[in-house]
Amino acid sequence: MYDVDPTTPGLCAYWKFNEGGGDIAKDYTENGNDAKSYADALWPSGIEVTQKNK
């Protein structure tokens, strides 16, 4: 829900879930751990998560 540095040591994956469609959530680290939905993913529109300290 908040900003994460994708180069943080020990971070296995970082998914933002901001694709808006499809069944893959991209991993923003260099590890390539994309997440795949095993059912039809629902991507509601108009939802924003407030970021702390911004």
Image (spheres, grey):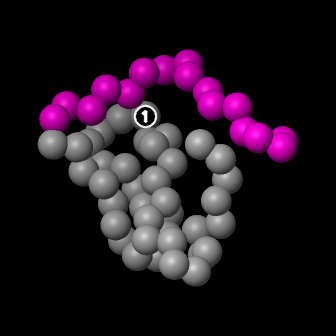
Q: Please state the extent of the stretch shown in magenta in the rendering.
A: 39-54
Indicate the position of residue 13 as horizontal and vertical percent values: 44, 65
Secondary element type, mark 1? loop
Image point (31%, 26%), residue name = 42
- Quarter holding residue 41: top left
Measured as percent of width and height from the top left, residue 32 is found at 36, 71
4 or 28, nearer to the observer: 4
Compared with 52, 49 (above or below) is above
Drawn side of residue 10 relative to residue 54, left or right: left
Name the residue carrying label 1. Answer: 20
* Image point (61%, 27%), residue name: 48
Residue 6 in magenta stretch: no
Q: Is residue 27 left or right of residue 35?
A: right
Residue at the farthest right position: 54
Q: Quadrant of residue 27?
A: bottom left
Left or right: 51 as drawn, with respect to 35: right
| Rendered residue at 83%/43% (across/down) | 53
Against 27, residue 44 (above or below) is above
